[in-house]
Amino acid sequence: MNELTYYVLATTHSGTGENLWGWTATFEIERHRPREETREWILDNLRDLLAEGLVSVGNYEPDGPGRAGWDEWQGTPDEIVERVAAIYTLETGEVEVPFWPCYIMDTPKGDALFESERARRIAAGLDPMARDDGIWDQDGNVIEAHGDEIVL
């Protein structure tokens, strides 16, 4: 598993969830790429995560059916990614902020994979903390081969 995959699984681990706009802001800064390119890159990686069953997408609804009102969006990875793409907005103000009113949440498969990789890192004497640094260098170049893709 590469650093990107470990990082995105860590952000959703154990039901903590992740605002998709949090990934967007972080990755746009780290990658040194235009906003639209980062948006498409995130959607492609989200599709891969969904296809592997490693995350789910949804939102809080006052009477949602799941844990604490969680309403998981149903459909194929392509359908869910299309829905996510359709709700992308730019909040204007002093600085334009990309916003996706949805959350990325864990799945049992994603949690198990994260825990397995975390245990492997600990056993190997590696730092198990997931970080977004170490994926790109200071110029936004990918450090490891396929380091900006979901790799298991």
Image: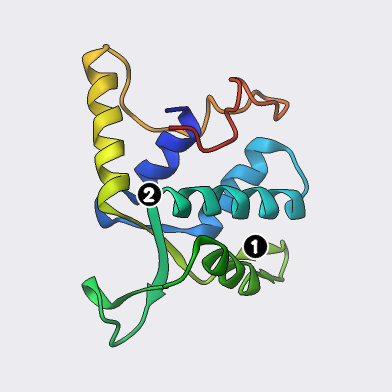
Q: Mark 1 and 2 residues: CB-CB less than 8 Å, in contact?
A: no
Q: Where is residue 80 in the image (x, y as percent from the top left)?
A: 52, 67
Up/down of 138 relative to 124, above or below: below
Up/down of 25 relative to 80, above or below: above
Residue closest to the far top = 125
Residue type pointed to by label 2? Leu
* Left or right, residue 128 beside residue 46: left
Query: Which numbered disc covers residue 98?
Result: 1
Location of residue 60 by image quarter: bottom left
- Indicate the secondary structure of the residue bearing disc 2: loop
* Residue at 45% in and 54% down: 50
* Left or right, residue 135 beside residue 118: right
Q: How far apart are marks 1 and 2 (CA)?
A: 24 Å
From the image, state whether disc 1 or disc 2 is nearer to you. Answer: 2
Q: Which colour scheme is used?
A: rainbow
Residue type pointed to by label 1? Pro
* Residue at 24% in and 35% down: 115
Residue denoted by label 2: 54
